[in-house]
Image: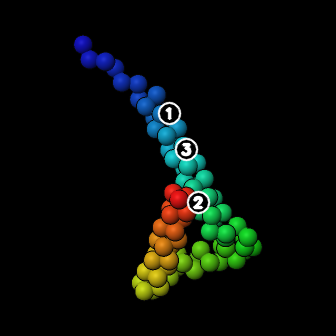
Amino acid sequence: MRKTRDYDAELRALGEKAKALKAKKVEQLGQLVTSTGADALDLDILAGILITAVESSNAEEKEAWRAKGSAFFQQRGKKTRG
């Protein structure tokens, strides 16, 4: 005989997993802000910078930001390993 599925329990489990993933993302964003030193910026400045980046359609500018970010993480990786 087939086992009856408990849809309510599955939905609760998915909801809890979604909450956990959102909390992890928020924590990682906080760590990113702190590790880059952006936590020293005024919140209005930081928000303005982020909004400008999101609204930017300049592919060259975004690629430069991506390269700079990648280099930052590669440097951090070398410091923590050594």
| Residue 43 shown left or right of residue 80 in the figure | right
* Residue 8 image point, x, y percent: 46, 29
Q: CA distance from mark 2 to mark 3?
A: 15 Å
**Relative to 56, residue 41 above or below:** above
Please report the residue visible at 50 percent of the width from the left and 82 percent of the height from the top.
56
Q: Badge 2 is on which residue? A: 29
Q: Given the image, on which type of amino acid does mark 2 rest? A: Leu
- Judging from the image, what secondary structure is the residue with disc 3 in? helix
Mark 1 Cα shell of 10 Å, populated few (<14), some (14-19), many (≥20): few
Count of numbered circles on the image = 3
Question: In the depicted view, which residue is nearer to us: 66 or 74?
Answer: 74
Q: Which mark is residue 19?
A: 3
Q: Given the image, on which type of amino acid does mark 1 rest? A: Arg
Q: CA distance from mark 1 to mark 3?
A: 10 Å
- Judging from the image, what secondary structure is the residue with disc 2 in? helix
Q: Which mark is residue 70?
A: none
Please report the residue visible at 43 percent of the width from the left and 31 percent of the height from the top.
10
Question: In the depicted view, which residue is nearer to us: 44 or 29?
Answer: 29
**Relative to 3, residue 48 above or below:** below
* Residue 80 image point, x, y percent: 55, 58
Q: Badge 1 is on which residue? A: 12
Q: Given the image, on which type of amino acid does mark 3 rest? A: Lys
Label 1 or label 2, whichever comes before in sequence order:
1
